[in-house]
Image (cartoon, rainbow, N blue to C red):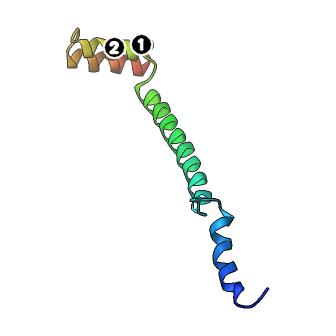
Amino acid sequence: MTTAMLPTLAATVPSHMWGPGYGPGWFILIPIFWILLIGFFIFFSRRMYWRHRLQGDPMSAEGVLRERYARGEIDETEYRQRLEVLRSGNK
């Protein structure tokens, strides 16, 4: 092996090390893809959990009262009065 062949050999080794058309960028992109996918899953599952927690149980007394108010069966003053009674614990 002569010294004239070393630059040619050094230039060809990196291009063939990763295969044809693939560079070292794939080793960075694949973990980033999985991290983003898992991050989105965690974000949306927590969002659904907090949304459910803020709205409460639809079958609870407050949930039924909220549904009646949304359908227009009761007005705002009656809704607030009944909600106050429910939250105070008096029946």
Amino acid marked by disc 2: Leu
The part of the image, by quadrant, that contains residue 86 is: top left
Residue at (56% x, 56% y) in the render: 29
x and y, in percent, of residue 23 in the image: 59, 63
Q: Which residue is mark 2?
A: 65
Residue drawn at x 65%, y 73% is 12
Horizontal side, residue 25 vs residue 56: left or right: right
* Vertical arrangement, residue 67 with respect to residue 30, above or below: above
> Vertical placement of 3 versus 64: above or below?
below
Secondary structure beneath dot 1 equals helix
Residue, x 21% and y 12% (percent of image)?
72
The residue that disc 1 covers is 61
Badge 2: few (under 14), some or many (20 or more) residues near its Cα, within 10 Å? many
Side of 57 relative to 24 (left or right): left
Is label 2 in a helix, a strand or a loop?
helix
Q: Position of residue 60 (x, y in %)?
A: 45, 14
Contact flag, marks 2 and 1 (Cβ < 8 Å): yes
The amino acid type, in three-letter code, at marker 1 is Ala
Judge from the rendering whether residue 4 lies leftward or rightward of residue 51; answer left or right. right
Mark 2 vs mark 1, CA separation in Å = 6 Å
